[in-house]
Image: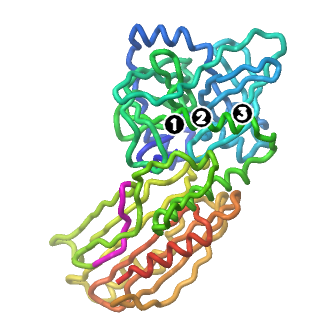
Amino acid sequence: MLCGLSCLPVQAQEPPIEARPPSSSAEKTTQLPLPPPSASARELFSRYKDRLVQVRVLLNSANEQSALGSGFVVQDEGSKGLWVLTNYHVISSLAIHPEKFRIELRPTTEKTITASLVAIDVIHDLAVLRGETEGGSSAWPAFTLRADAPVQGERIFSLGNPLELGFLISEGIYNGLVESRIYEQMLFSGALNSGMSGGPTIDETGRVVGVNVATQRNGELLSFLVPVRYARELLEHARQAVARKEWRSEIARQLLVHQDFVAGKILGLPNPLKTSDPAAQGVIANAKAGFATQTLAGRNVPTLDGSLTKCWAGGRDGERLRYQRDTLDCTLRSDLFVRGDLYTGSLGVRHVLLRNDKLATPQFLAIGSFTRAISSMFERNSSREMTADECRDDYVKGGARVYRVALCLKAYRKFEGLYDFTVSATQVDDAHERMTSTLFLHGFSFENGQRLSRMFLERLQ
């Protein structure tokens, strides 16, 4: 799910707010009331509701639900079972800990169906499930996947089971592909709420055009869909897949494919993604990103540039302050959802420039000390996800200034080959002006982390 901090997956029903940890980003989500459906929407829902399922991930030890989402039937093979599509983030806990969880499917009827995970696409946030049906039962109706893309302005309809309130339909408009994404996502001007993740979005003839995936948390009626062609490709892959009992290695492999492509974009490598892997397709042709140089208070600093990046600046000064503080932050919109609040495959750059006006030199040097900055670098991930950080520092001569540079590294416990890097360079040769420049890398290989860190440091003045 390529949303970053500005949007959230419309995933499983979560515990009540009072039961959530204070840091839960779900508390910031605004659930929008769904408008009453039109006559055509009511007719579509009546015709296709029996092809929907609620996807329930249950914790074995408690025999209670841990996550809820939606899914839809794409084929019934009789005694061989049902083929069901949903989102990866709906079943991510089971994919990472299959020994702790199990999957159940609940259709519009009262019966419950046991299901297993068959294929995942972490990059496009998709999963294929296989539901176990009883032999001799009547054929299950299935959705048809539309072959061509919808036209911008076309009416489309999202179906799902939000907040465990029951299956329903949400009407909206297809507004083209989202331009600020690495991989293709469709913009749906309609309401999606928690629990609708993995449900289908259909056209007026009932054909699936996309899969519900996320909603903008600071906007209204701004939602995102995965184009159905990636669901079709994953389904074809699932038909040939060999049954497996563990998924961590496959998740890690796909995350490495993603970070390799992102690193190639930043490093300016020609054709950075050379693979036929279905999970690596759908790259936006004009998606651009790379290192650039920008001016902050008259100083040239390395930043990020391109259609996939976003930068913002801030400044503090005035009579009450005896020093000035200017900041510049740039982020690359490339993070993928892994589980919970863990995202990988993104990077950011931060510059903090302090200029002394009235402070004594010792007071100025104590502001944002190097030691305190290093100790706070790794607050992003919990220890259960990451190893203990290892840091090294040294003095480096830049183009015109001397810096104290610290490199810190953490490894992902569950995904071999992935690391978080933080490279921080603090100017130490001026008692009246000090710049701290930091590069943050989340979920990169050791080799790509080194290459990106080296390029960043080479651009320091």
Give the Cα separation between the discs numbered 1 and 3: 25 Å
Residue designated by label 2: 231
Residue at x-position 57% and y-position 82%: 392
In the image shown, does 306 or 431 lie closer to the viewer? 306
The range drawn in magenta is 300-307
Question: Mark 2 falls on what kind of element?
Answer: helix
Residue 290 place in picture, x, y as percent: 41, 65
Callout 3: few (<14), some (14-19), or many (20+) C-alpha neighbours within 10 Å? many
Q: Is residue 66 visible?
A: no
Q: Earlier in the sequence, mark 2 or mark 1?
A: 1
Q: Earlier in the sequence, mark 2 or mark 3?
A: 3
- Per the image, is 322 magenta? no
Q: Amino acid at mark 2?
A: Ala
Q: Is residue 74 above or below residue 248?
A: above
Q: Nearer the viewer, mark 1 or mark 3?
A: 1
Question: Mark 3 falls on what kind of element?
Answer: strand
Instruction: Say which mark, if any, is on residue 58.
Output: 3
Q: Is residue 193 above or below residue 407?
A: above
Give the Cα separation between the discs numbered 2 and 3: 24 Å
Residue 180 place in picture, x, y as percent: 39, 49
Q: Amino acid at mark 1?
A: Val
Q: Residue furthest left?
A: 319
Count of numbered tags? 3
* Marks 2,1: beta carbons within 8 A: yes
Question: Mark 1 falls on what kind of element?
Answer: strand
Residue designated by label 1: 226
Callout 2: few (<14), some (14-19), or many (20+) C-alpha neighbours within 10 Å? many
